[in-house]
Image (spheres, rainbow, N blue to C red):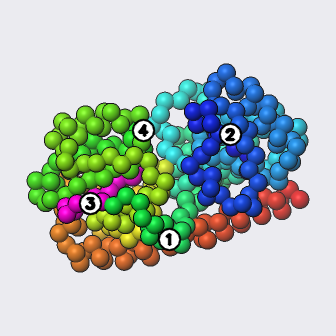
Amino acid sequence: MIINKAVNGRYKDEYFDLVDDSVNIINLQIPIRKTHFPKIIWKAKKTIEKVEPDIVMSTMLKSNIFFTMILMLCRGHYNCVLRESNNHSIEKHCALKKRFIKYMYSTYAKRCIALSEGVKKDLVDNFYVDQDNIDVIFNPINIKQINAMQQEPSIKLETKAKKIVAVGRLVAQKDYPTLLKAMSVLRSKINCKLYILGEGILENQLKEDIQHYGLEHHVELLGFQKNPYYIMAQADIFVLSSAWEGFGHVIVEAMAVGIPVVSTNCDFGPGEIITNGVNGILVEVGDYKAMAEQMYQILCDKEKAANIVNAAHLRAKDFDVRVIVKQYEKLFIQLCHETS
């Protein structure tokens, strides 16, 4: 595993200790700055040529573009697998970039992995990527690990109110303003409190919005949590208010934890995970009134909530790491056989 992680000049990552000791990590240890790009390119190139991997894999658009350019400079040929995890048609891309994305995913990469059927459709329809070169493999969750971590005490939610939890970066994509509007409606009907786990560039704006809606005593920002599952397990409901997603990984995590989910039916992911009214609830993007109403119904109807949780537990098993890893393993073995 070759990575390049630099946080405030220190080479670390919150998830390093989750990687098994048997995995060899080569950390390039170069701060991510534009002035350092030539050094990153040169060091990554030399490392790949030295290791001579059977398969080289990268994930997410910017990293994929950068890594493809590095591979094109390398001596020798490597099986390149590129994974796309988000909806990029909402962004503006120049014609040259769109042509390179098509070349990268259709021609240069041996296989492209899309995080959902929606991401695949986005690549095909908007970037003209060859659909025959795309495999859909969903994000995995480790149900055994989640169940263990939700028993490890961290932050106790000290309130008699109904507890609502949202998890995600504080960015425009997550559309927290819609969730806050829903909370302003919901709190007039029932005693409730929202806990948001995450950090991001819109934190100050979010705090202003909380004050604007008079939610100072009904919303609490808990920041980034390395173990969110203990907190999630205390909640009565989980909410995802995103305007768009690549998949909606946190929905499956909430299902595994055992709390009912209300999510926007955004592009892409939630509609592929949730069967509306069976193992979760879907509402239209930006519809805060519908979101508040669905949360209210679940919070007031214990039988409905229990039925959703039971069905969601079964659905979460489809995304267990043991299932998803086999799909990656099958793809990697196939690639190695094709070039052996």
Residue 192 in sight in this render: yes
56 lies left or right of 147: right
* Image mark for residue 148: 1
Query: Could you classify mark 4 by the number of other residues whose Cα lies within 10 Å: few (under 14), some (14-19), or many (20 or more)?
Result: some
The earlier-in-sequence mark between 4 and 1 is 1
Between the C-alphas of marks 4 and 1, the distance is 28 Å
Residue 150 among magenta residues: no
Query: Could you classify mark 3 by the number of other residues whose Cα lies within 10 Å: few (under 14), some (14-19), or many (20 or more)?
Result: few
Q: Which residue is mark 2?
A: 4
Between the C-alphas of marks 1 and 2, the distance is 30 Å
Picture quadrant where residue 305 is located:
bottom left
The earlier-in-sequence mark between 1 and 2 is 2
The earlier-in-sequence mark between 4 and 2 is 2
319 lies left or right of 37: left
Residue extending farthest top? 35
Residue type, mark 1 in image: Ala
The earlier-in-sequence mark between 3 and 2 is 2
Q: Which mark is nearer the camera, 1 or 2? A: 1
Q: Which residue is mark 4?
A: 200
Residue type, mark 2 in image: Asn
Q: Is disc 4 in contact with disc 1, using a CB cutoff of under 8 Å?
A: no
Q: Which residue is mark 3?
A: 158
Callout 3: helix, strand or loop? loop
Picture quadrant where residue 199 is located:
top left
Between the C-alphas of marks 3 and 2, the distance is 39 Å
Q: Which residues are magenta?
A: 157-168
